[in-house]
Image (spheres, helix red, strand yellow):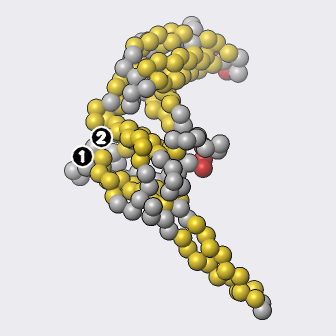
Amino acid sequence: MDTWSRRMEVRTGETDVVYEVDLGAPLSFEIANWPKGQREYLRFAVLLPESHLPENPSLRPHARLGRTMRFEGLDPDETYTLRVVGMDDGTCFVGSGIVPGPDVRRIRLVPGRTIRGQLLLPPGHEKPSVTASSGLDGVSGTVDERGAFEIRGLPDGEWRVKARASGPDGTWSMGEVFVEAGDEVGILLEEHDG
């Protein structure tokens, strides 16, 4: 396994202290079908260890979104799952069993699935929003004036779909369901006090 470390020396008066800091293994991806001339193309990319979810989601590996992404500080003995969702074209990529290493891997985004449905709002509630989440990542959808919604570019699997709307006098409404990518569903939003 290719790992890398940095040697750090600290001079403190009469003694020198040497620390060996293990910075983990790298993992790099290049998107083979990145649209020509496009600067931004991705909604998100998430890399998750397969043996466990991190206790603190903010500690999961991050990379700058771009044609090439590099994750660093990974456990060289762990396998990872990568999820990538395209911006507005409904494309995605999911790969699992990925082992860190120095080579750049080429991936290709493919058409994802769409969750469609209808939001049923209480009277007077407006500005609905809808989001699908699976694990630590989420994808926002679009909602029209009649409450019909669509969330595009989802990898296969179960998704938690949450909807929310604003009501009169500081009230709000919310509803959620669990569905498979590609399903159609109705979501009843229940009113709550602000």
Which residue of the protein is positioned furthest toward the right in this rendering? 14
**Quadrant containing the C terminus in the rendered view:** top right
Point 47% across, 45% down: residue: 80
Numbered circles on residues, count: 2
- The crowd level at tag 1 (other Cα within 10 Å; few <14, some 14-19, many 20+) is few
Point 59% across, 18% down: residue: 174
Report which residue position mark 2 lands on.
109
Checking the image for residue 171, the label placed there is none
Which of the pair 133/78 is nearer the observer? Answer: 78
The alpha-carbon separation of the residues under discs 2 and 1 comes to 7 Å
Point 56% across, 48% down: residue: 60
**Quadrant containing the N terminus in the rendered view:** bottom left
**Residues at marks 2 and 1 touching, judged by CB atoms closer than 8 Å:** yes
Left or right of 44? Residue 31 is left
Q: Secondary structure at mark 1?
A: loop
Q: Which amino acid, by three-letter code, is at mark 2?
A: Leu
Among numbered discs 2 and 1, the one appearing first in the sequence: 1
Report which residue position mark 1 lands on.
33
Q: Which amino acid, by three-letter code, is at mark 1?
A: Asn
